[in-house]
Amino acid sequence: MINKTIFIVPFAALVLLGGCADPRVGPNSKTGWVTEFYTAERLMANRPSCLANLSDTDIASHRYALISVPHLRSYRYVNALVPDSIEIELHDKVEIFPPSCKDGALPQVVQVLKHSRKKQ
């Protein structure tokens, strides 16, 4: 009986934890919540380091948002490009890729996973 328990408990934990992953999210993506939208004026005056290399034309012609991404027991904040084809609002749950602004790559909102409220 003890031998079966040694194998059943880890297997059951693996099955339960495997159910927590969202199958809609890519393997190298992260999920987070839209915390704030940047205005072009604000970005022209004071750019976050991730958006520092963008031209004034890029800033004026695109939308950018601050996304809070769960990280261990706290949150990490990531600046991301919001494509014109995606409609998001504050507090929507979104997928971003790449997950950080490492190596000069600009994170981008890939999809909305959950709207914060119903559309009317």
Image (spheres, rainbow, N blue to C red):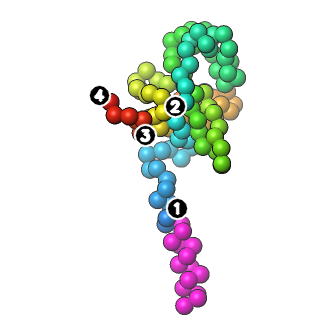
Residue at x 59%, y 81% (from the top left corner): 6
Q: CA distance from mark 2 to mark 3?
A: 11 Å
Quadrant of residue 76 within the rendered picture: top right
Instruction: Report helix, strand or loop for mark 3.
Output: strand
Quarter of the image where the N terminus is located = bottom right
Instruction: Tell me which amino acid carries mark 3.
Output: Leu
Q: Nearer the viewer, mark 4 or mark 3?
A: 4
Mark 2 → mark 4, Cα distance in angstroms: 20 Å
Of all residues shown, which one is farthest toward the bottom? 1
Say which label, 2 or 3, has the lower sequence index: 2
Question: Reading the chain from its start, which is encountered first: label 2 or label 4?
Answer: 2
Q: Which residue is mark 1?
A: 17
Percent coordinates x, y for residue 42 in the rendering? 61, 13
Q: Give yes or no for residue 70 being in the magenta stretch.
A: no
Write the residue at 49% across / 25% down. 82
Q: Which residue is mark 2?
A: 34
Q: Give the crowd class for mark 4: few <14, some 14-19, many >=20 residues within 10 Å.
A: few
Describe the element under mark 4 as helix, strand or loop. Answer: loop
Identified at 42% across, 35% down, the residue is: 116
Residue range highlighted in magenta:
1-14
Residue designated by label 3:
113
Say whether residue 8 is visible.
yes
For the residues bearing labels 1 and 2, Cβ distance under 8 angstroms: no
